[in-house]
Image (cartoon, grey):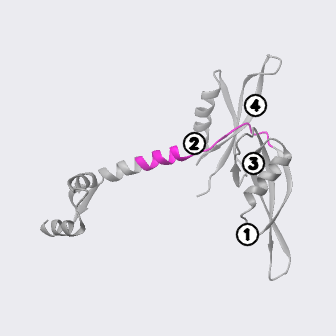
Amino acid sequence: MSATWYECKVKYRKLNDAGVQKVTTEPYLVDAISYTEAESRINEEMSAYISEEFKITNIKVANYAEIHPFENSDRWFKSKVSLIAYDEESGKERKSNLYLLVQANDIKEAFDNTNQMMRDTMGDYTIPAISESPIMDVFPYFSGEEGDQERIERFNAIKESAPIVVEEEVIATNAEINSSIPLEEDEETLMIATEEE
């Protein structure tokens, strides 16, 4: 399942380079499954960064096919990639465009990073345009293995406490069965124990 990215515009007071507070509106991206969740997530994320009051002025679905962060880069660039396909019937070339959000320090690095992301593509492609994006930051669901590990642990906890039902009669939970079988028993012992039950 591919991620849906929502662009959220946040209005708040920010200190400029001269040390004067100025009202500014900045766009951020969040990974969410609905507008409501996007609003909730951007509120949560921005509360950690902004101590003063802020307002979400707009939320819309962003048209990025993929987001590619790179270490030691602080700016985001929108790369337009044209995939080239050949129509065998007409013999003509067809192009379909997709947009990538790539992190880089300048346009050349954004071009190199886009090529790096597209290197495993089977078909031909071109990069007709790259422009700096106004996006300030990106908030994905999970930044790495920590979130995935947490989901796995939660799933295993639910699975272990789930009852085993045979002909609509609860016999035991997986946790009870797992704790009653010694770990060092071989298959023959387990088969005998199963037959006796």
Q: In this view of the protein, which residue sits in the foreground, 6 or 163?
A: 163
Decide if residue 158 is on the left or right side of residue 82.
Answer: left
Q: Earlier in the sequence, mark 2 or mark 4?
A: 4
Please provide percent x and percent y for residue 32.
Answer: 60, 46
Residue name at image x 35 percent, y 50 percent: 158
Q: CA distance from mark 3 to mark 1?
A: 20 Å
What whole-number distance in Å separates the C-alpha atoms at marks 2 and 4?
20 Å
Q: Is residue 148 above or below residue 27?
A: below
Q: Nearer the viewer, residue 183 or 26?
A: 183
Q: Earlier in the sequence, mark 2 or mark 1?
A: 2
Please name the residue that numbered disc 1 is placed on.
122
Which range is magenta?
133-153
Query: Closer to the N terminus: mark 3 or mark 1?
Result: 3
Q: Considering the numbered disc 3 on the image, is that residue within a helix, a strand or a loop?
A: strand
Q: Is residue 42 above or below residue 77?
A: above
Label 3 sits on residue: 102
Say what amino acid the circle numbered 4 marks: Thr
| Residue found 77% across the figure and 27% down from its top | 24
Q: Amino acid at mark 1?
A: Met
Tag 1 secondary structure: loop
Tell me the quarter of the picture where residue 193 sits: bottom left
Tell me the element at label 2.
helix
Between discs 3 and 4, the one toward the N terminus: 4
Q: Nearer the viewer, mark 1 or mark 4?
A: 1
Q: Is residue 87 left or right of residue 149?
A: right
Q: Which residue in the rendered view is the most extreme toward the bottom?
A: 89
Q: At 73% across and 39% down in the image, what residue appears?
A: 72
The disc label shown at residue 25, or none: 4
Q: Which mark is residue 37?
A: 2
Q: CA distance from mark 2 to mark 1?
A: 35 Å
* Residue 69 position (above or below residue 42): below
